[in-house]
Amino acid sequence: MELGLKGKVAIVAASSQGMGRATAAAFAAEGCKIAMCARNEQTLALAAESIRKQYSAEVFSCALDVTDAGAVRFVEEVVLRFGAADICVTNAGGPPAKGFLAASMEDWQKAIEANFMSAVYFAREVIPHMQRRRWGRIITLTSITTKQPLADLVLSNTVRAAVVGLVKSLANEFGKDGILVNNVGPGFTATDRLKELARSRSAASGTAEKEIFEGWAADAPLRRLGEPEEVADTIVWLASDRASYVTGQTVLVDGGMYKGL
């Protein structure tokens, strides 16, 4: 199926590993020019070089912290290098697994900066470029917690929901400019972040990590964890011409885990 993405410029945040890296690779496979960023310069450089070689793609990478509004101005460098900022996927590592009373005020501030304000920073940078071209896609990568809060994830449950409010607001305001804004909410997906969550729950409960993973898999009708590539494919579809009448939505990639209607 022709997705209409060849030659588009895709910015993918937190793309040195996990779902972010899988997303950058999926866009490269469609013929996009790729701009990658993450905090760890070495891991990012390795990921960028791998994608560059595998897909013969034009890849620009820049080590930065998405909680730094000034650093996110790397979008300007992307536009200077590639001529556009057509697609922007916002992403950041999830906040620590904690209950409400265990979460400090510093934890709250960090979660807000990483998982909400980073999306604001990217949106402010890319929207003017998208307006000029009358075409753009902003896709936020969050979690199933935007629809179904999970135990011991009060930070994610709360801050991710704010991102959905931002997505709806941007979709309403900039649809007239040809800019589509959507959110993707993965369920339990096989990433290092999930391993970290399993370790945390294992330490708190005394349950073996293997049992925790099995429980997560059993909670989804498909009886397995998701793969980063499955999340990436959904993001690429939302960015494509095949999703040209979809905006302001949260699309869950959760194997049916969400129990609501």
Image (cartoon, helix red, strand yellow):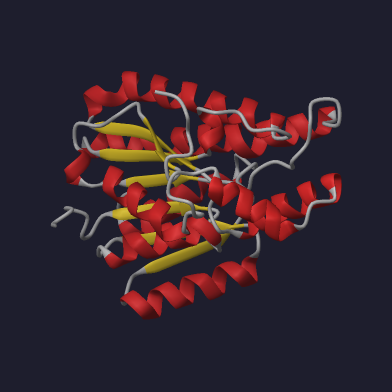
Where 62 sits versus 217, above or below? below
> What x and y, as percent, mark residue 165?
48, 21
- Going 51% across and 71% down the picture, which residue do you hit? 47
Can residue 39 be seen here? The reply is yes
- Going 47% across and 29% down the picture, which residue do you hit? 259
Q: Is residue 179 left or right of residue 113?
A: left
> What x and y, as percent, mark residue 83?
30, 54
Can residue 35 be seen here? The reply is no
**Extreme bottom residue here?**
53
Nearer to the camera, 155 or 244: 155
Where 126 sits versus 75, above or below? above
Nearer to the camera, 218 or 181: 218
Q: Which quadrant does the N terminus fall into?
A: bottom left
> What x and y, as percent, mark residue 33?
32, 62
- Going 39% across and 75% down the picture, which residue do you hit? 52
Nearer to the camera, 188 or 184: 188
